[in-house]
């Protein structure tokens, strides 16, 4: 798993590497813009005012929500990512921290109309994903929604097909979402396929 220094080093070139992978339609970021665009439209259509982003990176998604008038809160592992995102969203409430054990105390004190996590939770194992998602659902305001966009698959067979196609590019240190293997632990979880290696998982309050 990447450490904080690895994320800091990657931060300045992150958006370019993601864009290239998405444009090529290749693992791991094929479907990235579709995932973010879908979440953005749904958050805004629901009239969400306060939004929490867990693992916001450079702020690619939340900067759009911020510019649309949302009150943005967030936590990210990388100090450099926080710095870059804060530059894009001067009024956002952004914290540096390791959310693998849960989000920061300042974040837990509030309730959110929408919570988003894009391409950040694959650094947690399945038990860690379930624990964090359960905590996050508890932070939703009435009628709120949790959106997770990531490298994700409906079934283990789909994951293995993607692994075979990716070959040496496959990152075996990351633990990707497999909907069939998580839905029993997270009642109400839904899955939408966005590309051969991307999916959108949604939970409600």
Image (tube, grey):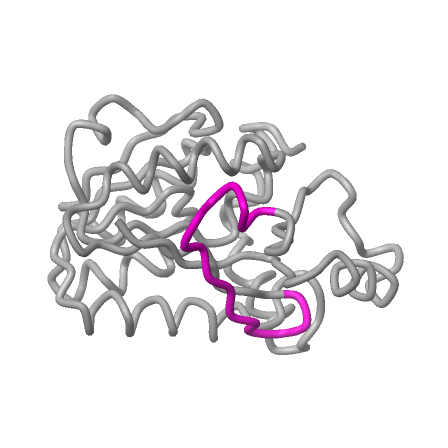
In which quadrant will I find the N terminus? top right
Quick check: 129 left or right of 81? Answer: right
Q: Nearer the viewer, residue 198 or 29?
A: 198
Q: Which residue corresponds to the image point at 79% horizontal and 53% vertical from the top-left? A: 170
Image position, residue 86 (x, y; %) = 27, 44
Q: Which residue corresponds to the image point at 88% horizontal and 59% vertical from the top-left? A: 167
Look at the picture and state if 181 lies above or below 109: below
Image position, residue 126 (x, y; %) = 61, 37
Quick check: 11 left or right of 89? Answer: right
171 in the magenta segment = no
Q: Which residue corresponds to the image point at 70% horizontal and 60% vertical from the top-left? A: 155
Which quarter of the picture shows residue 174? top right
The boundaries of the magenta stretch are: 182-197
Q: Nearer the viewer, residue 34 or 132?
A: 132
Look at the picture and state if 109 lies above or below 188: above
Q: Which residue corresponds to the image point at 41% horizontal and 67% vertical from the top-left? A: 36
Which quarter of the picture shows residue 172? top right
Image position, residue 76 (x, y; %) = 40, 36
Image position, residue 139 (x, y; %) = 24, 38
């Amino acid at each position: 798993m990447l450490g904080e220094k690895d994320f800091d080093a990657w931060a300045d070139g992150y958006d370019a590497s993601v864009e290239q992978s998405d444009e090529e339609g290749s693992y791991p970021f094929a479907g990235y813009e579709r995932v973010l665009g879908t979440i953005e439209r749904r958050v805004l259509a629901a009239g969400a005012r306060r939004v929490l982003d867990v693992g916001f990176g450079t702020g690619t998604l939340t900067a759009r929500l911020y510019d649309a008038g949302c009150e943005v809160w967030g936590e990210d592992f990388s100090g450099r990512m926080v710095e870059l995102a804060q530059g894009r969203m001067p009024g956002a409430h952004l914290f540096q921290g390791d959310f693998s054990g849960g989000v920061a105390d300042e974040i837990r004190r509030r309730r959110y109309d929408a919570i988003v996590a894009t391409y950040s939770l694959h650094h947690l194992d399945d038990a860690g994903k379930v624990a964090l998602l359960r905590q996050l659902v508890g932070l939703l305001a009435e009628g709120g929604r949790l959106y997770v966009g990531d490298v994700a698959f409906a079934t283990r067979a789909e994951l293995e097909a993607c692994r075979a196609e990716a070959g040496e590019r496959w990152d075996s240190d990351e633990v990707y979402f497999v909907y069939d293997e998580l839905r029993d632990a997270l009642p109400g979880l839904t899955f939408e396929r966005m590309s051969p290696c991307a999916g959108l998982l949604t939970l409600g309050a």
